[in-house]
Image (cartoon, rainbow, N blue to C red):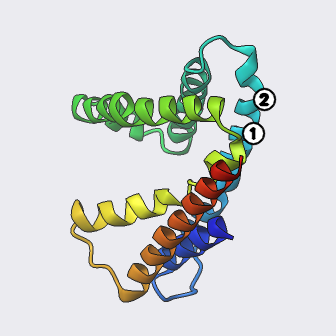
Amino acid sequence: LATSLMVLGAVVIVFKGSLDFNLGDILILLTPFFFQFSHVVAKKVLPLVSNASVIPAARMFYSGLMLFLIAIFLNPQSFGQVVSQASLAGIVAFAFIFSTLAMSLWYEGIKRLPLAKASALLPLAALVSFLGSIVLLRETATPQQFFGLILIVGGLIWLSLQQLKSIKLS
């Protein structure tokens, strides 16, 4: 129930009071299913490798290569933009700082925790994105989005209390 509360909060933040679906909304809603499927596969492969960092490295390498090829196929003119010095510097900095750190932490975490427990915290991504859009992008938030924020934080507190209770009982 706590995780459902956090997911509901994420949905409330995303929809900004409107139920008008567009292709972007549908793609964003489908994304967690593919992430979770890849996490299930990764959890199955983890015992087969000596270093958990191998999995995200391979995942990012192959998915990055495929995305690059798809982008070039769909828009051949974009090749110059992708390999320009300015774009490449930003892409490399993002990859090394954020993606590498996030993937390393995630895989080290799921190596040590049940996947269901680790995945329960994924709705926090909406919270981080929401707060980042306000602070860094200066976006204006609606009261409904703040309500979604309260649901996510409430679900997180509830989940944490459940975990503490189960630790005390064992």
Task: Check disc 2 and give the amino acid type.
Answer: Lys
Few, some or many C-alpha atoms within 10 Å of disc 2 (few <14, some 14-19, many ≥20)? few
Marks 1 and 2, how far apart in space? 6 Å
Task: Check disc 1 and give the amino acid type.
Answer: Val
Quadrant in which residue 83 is drawn? top left
The residue drawn where x is 49% and y is 33% is 105
The residue drawn where x is 41% and y is 40% is 77
Examine the rendering and report whether any part of residue 26 can be seen.
no
The residue drawn where x is 52% and y is 79% is 12
The residue drawn where x is 78% and y is 29% is 44
| The N terminus - image quarter | bottom right
x, y percent for residue 158 = 57, 67
Per the image, the residue denoted by label 2 is 44
Examine the rendering and report whether any part of residue 106 can be seen.
yes
* Secondary structure of residue under mark 2: helix
x, y percent for residue 163 = 62, 54
Residue 126's tag is: none
Q: Are marks 1 and 2 in contact (CB under 8 Å)?
A: yes
Few, some or many C-alpha atoms within 10 Å of disc 1 (few <14, some 14-19, many ≥20)? some
x, y percent for residue 78 = 40, 40
* Secondary structure of residue under mark 1: helix
Per the image, the residue denoted by label 1 is 40
Quadrant in which residue 96 is drawn? top left
